[in-house]
Amino acid sequence: MGLVAVHLYRPFSIKHFIGTIPKTAKRIAVLDRTKEAGSNGEPLYLDVKDTFYGKENAPIIVGGRYGLSSKDTTPAQILSVFENLALPEPKNHFTIGIVDDVTFTSLPVKEEIALGGESLYEAKFYGLGADGTVGANKNSIKIIGDNTNKYCQAYFAYDSKKSGGFTSSHLRFGDTPIRSTYLVNTPNFVACHVQAYLKMYDVIRGLRQNGTFLLNTVWTGEELAKHLPNKIKRYFAQKNISVYYINATQIALEIGLGNRTNTILQSAFFRITQVIPVDLAIEQMKKFIVKSYGKKGEDIVNKNYAAVDRGGEYKQLTVDPAWANLLDNEVVANNDPAFINNVVRPINAQDGDLLPVSTFKGIEDGTWPQGTANYEKRGVAAFVPEWIPDNCIQCNKCAFVCPHAAIRPFVLNAEEQKDASFTTLKAIGKQFEGMTFRMQVSVLDCLDCGNCADVCPGNPKKGGKALTMKAFETQLAEAPHWEYCTNK
């Protein structure tokens, strides 16, 4: 088996191409990263067929397409190409990287395989846009590259939300050159920096046997064992995963870093994995802190120094062997449209690449219904505002400054108020005579920026603000109140 990469494509050099193909080659698969509509085949495939046309003992030549929709091409997909070539009658005009259950051109999907040998270490980090995870990992890969003899590679992925959105960082380092031009699929180490992601994304996908998992969570060890989804517990037990957790959110608040948990979790990563000596890692992290934040003042630098030092406050979770036999948690049925359940939710869960072609029947032209964001409800905030009616002066400043419209004022008439199960105030203003007022928070849409609580003037007579930040779990009862206010 072998690989020939064609870099000189036009003009296509038959002489040079033939010179690279062993005379013993019996079968050739040609991969094109394009779809030539209306043609009998893609450009490179047709050129290769023409090259061998009329030649004695010409090999069997089949063509296929890869990288459709800019998807990664992984070792598992290439393995399926070789397995196809080994068949008595190889499939021609095939595709890899998708599940084509409409025209059935795709090759069988195989489980991802880890390449690179024992020396290659792969790590994957899930973060929230603007929490510093990506920046910390850029520094981490520089620290490893500058202080060891290892080869390093890093990829970073973001969603369209930028600040407050989904981010993933993919790091590789090893003793031999790294030529993996795809994201990490089989990590040795996974860090989940957002507790809510446990139920939103498949954060353990591909984590290797005897791997390591680090979670940033506000839960204690006992609470974590209670709240972890059964699917994750089962994986931990079956794969013998070492699980660590740390309340970096609380530590960051205590230090004065707000929601910037990156330095704490970066320190925890180096301490847990020990990819380089911990003392050296701490020294280098502090050097990068000065480089990154030195112009912002000594106070910011010292706070980040404290974050590095407190990165060692992680604890290990005891994985119960009995978890290996747990069944998945029951899925709660809903009455949402089929498009939301079958297309939008898998895409929002970062599983869009796994959707089969049949899912898009009827929307081949790219048509997308409006209002789908209403079903997203990510619930990624660690802390959300709690409204204290007695201190509210109905100034609406909180709603004005919220960048995500996750807190809004509502005025209810007598009919609307009748079925409401929440507290309201008498609305201020002649035009609202006989009506009631409520400031309602959408806890599932909030992103924990705290702008609303900061700007709230409170009630000078009573001496307290009308909004205070509370733990997300304590405010979940507000979710149905938001639905009532917005849909009534």
Image (spheres, rainbow, N blue to C red):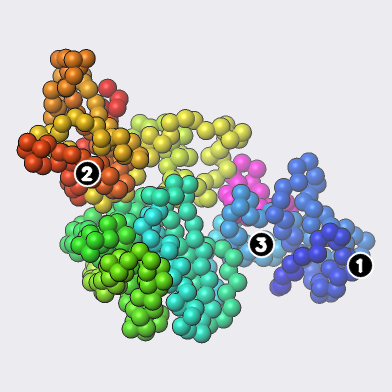
Location of residue 77 with respect to 439 vertically, above or below: below
Q: Amino acid at mark 1?
A: Glu
For disc 3, the neighbor class at 10 Å (few under 14, some 14 to 19, many from 20) is many
Residue 466 relative to residue 3: left or right: left
Spatial CA span between label 3 and label 1: 25 Å
Spatial CA span between label 2 and label 1: 80 Å
Q: Amino acid at mark 3?
A: Val
Tell me, yes or no, if residue 244 can be seen here. no
Instruction: For the residues labelled 3 and 2, say whether their Cβ atoms are less than 8 Å apart.
Output: no
The label on residue 453 is: 2
Q: Earlier in the sequence, mark 3 or mark 2?
A: 3
Please provide percent x and percent y for residue 196: 31, 52
The residue where tag 3 is placed is 81
The label on residue 56 is: 1
Spatial CA span between label 3 and label 2: 57 Å
* The residue stretch that appears in magenta: 89-105
Please provide percent x and percent y for residue 206: 44, 64
The quarter holding residue 377 reads top left
Q: Earlier in the sequence, mark 3 or mark 1?
A: 1
Quadrant (top left/top right/bottom left/bottom right) for the N terminus: bottom right
Principal secondary structure, stretch drawn in magenta: loop
Location of residue 82 with respect to 174 vertically, above or below: above
Question: What secondary structure is found at the residue carrying circle 3?
Answer: helix
Q: Amino acid at mark 2?
A: Ala
- Image point (72%, 70%), residue name: 3
Residue 167 relative to residue 409: left or right: right
- Image point (71%, 51%), residue name: 34
Tell me, yes or no, if residue 271 can be seen here. yes
- Image point (71%, 72%), residue name: 2
Question: What secondary structure is found at the residue carrying circle 1?
Answer: loop
Please provide percent x and percent y for residue 10: 84, 59
